[in-house]
Image: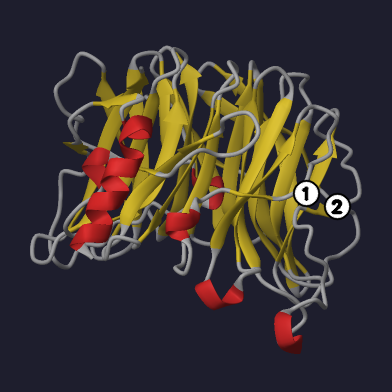
Amino acid sequence: MRAAALLLAVLAWPAQAAWEWSAPLTVNSVQGAAIFPHLESANRQGVAVSGDTVGVVWEDNRSGSPQCYLAMKPATAAAFKPEIRLSQADCFEPVVLALGAGRFVTAWEEAGTVHARVLPGGTVLQLTQAEAAQVTLAIRGDALYAAWAEQAGRFRRIVVARLTVNADALGVKTAQPVEAAMPADEQGWPALAVAGDGSVTVAWEDRRSRHTVPMVSHSRDGRSFSPPVRLTDIESGSAPGGLGAGTGAMRPTLTARGEQGVVAVWLDKRDFLSGYDVFAAIDTGNRRFGKNIRVQDNFGDNMAQWHALVVGDARGRLVALWDDARDGTPDVWLSEWEGEAFGDDVAVPGAAGPGGQSDPVATFDAAGSLHVVWLERGETAGTRIRYAHAERN
């Protein structure tokens, strides 16, 4: 195993040298063996950069019940400021987006409905009266959208809303389900992206085919959505050996890229013997995703990948991240789009090595720096939320 790890490090060196990483910082001020932070959310939006300030959201049980928190760090500060508690009742799956000038908008599930708030300052807005969960956000200019999974009869369906921001106050301008018909099976874990032309793309996990399939729909105006189509190019009923209705795929993530592009990354079990792999599809601007592309390299074969996400920026940069245990323990890996395919997998330096490093979330800032947050689990001291940023050489 040590020889394999050394070989992998040598082969990955040219790609790793392309990024210059900062020393990792700890985000959460409270840790302990019985405290369990989570960086899970729809579209994996746990970190944002607003002006020169980084914001990180998560949920942990330090108070005896699950609560959501936001911690911020200005560029001039050596450490993260003490976190702000967002919730009062049981809270799950918070997300954060940048509004600019050090301001953020956050959203989360609390007491069975979804909420949002502008920070610093701002008051909490309850986005739904119906039971809802798994909220996510997307923004382009002054166009701010939210999506969530809302109870509609027996099952949940995906709802997309246009939000308004007036100073520190949020409002709901419009809200409608992607499909008007009642859902025939469960829908959840939505992802949103707003392209450069203002069109909105939404993807989600869908069970209408009796197995989990990522579905996608587009809207030119954020109100009327196209009929959903599947992201995966593996048809239902084609599971190997007739095992079930089809191979599983889950947790789609979306990012806008370049002037009009949108990119999707998800976890896919079409090679069911090795667990989930990371797959991607690219929409170059025609509001149609192309063929499925495997993201991880051959060193990631024969093992499961987890917690995949994709981040892009207006300049066209595109990076996928995830964690897997190819070196014996979970590490965070990164692969950059090279024009025709994703490049070699690169371990994030502070998020690899002894112990367990997992659950990455990431974003680009306006200058093109990559900001990554992950969980670092120790044997006795509990779990730390760690942060580092990187400049492209």
Residue 182 is left or right of residue 263, and the answer is right
Q: Position of residue 285 (x, y in %)?
A: 80, 27
Q: Which residue sits furthest left?
A: 380
Q: Which mark is residue 228?
A: 2
Q: Is residue 321 left or right of residue 144?
A: left
Query: Regarding mark 1 in the picture, which secondary structure is present there?
Result: strand
Q: Which amino acid does label 2 sit on?
A: Pro
Cβ atoms under marks 1 and 2 closer than 8 Å: yes
Q: Position of residue 331 (x, y in %)?
A: 31, 54
Between residue 70 and residue 46, name the one nearer to us: 46
Quadrant including the C terminus: top left
Q: Give the residue displayed 35% in from the left and 56% down from the top.
A: 38
User: Visible in this render: residue 356?
Assistant: no
User: Is disc 2 placed on a helix, strand or loop?
Assistant: loop
Q: Using residue 191 as the reference point, say whether residue 169 is left or right of it.
A: left
User: Picture quarter containing residue 345?
Assistant: top left
Residue 99 picture location, percent across and down:
50, 20
Res 217 seen here: yes
Q: Is residue 116 above or below residue 314?
A: below
Which callout, 1 or 2, points at the residue further toward the start of the chain?
1
Q: Residue at x 25, y 16 (%)?
A: 75
What x and y, as percent, mark residue 183? 83, 66
How many dots with numbers? 2
Q: How is the image coloured?
A: secondary structure
- In whole angstroms, how far apart are the C-alphas of marks 1 and 2? 5 Å
Q: What is the crowding at mark 1: few (fewer than 14 residues within 10 Å), some, or many (at least 20)?
A: many
Residue position marked by numbered label 1 in the rendering: 216
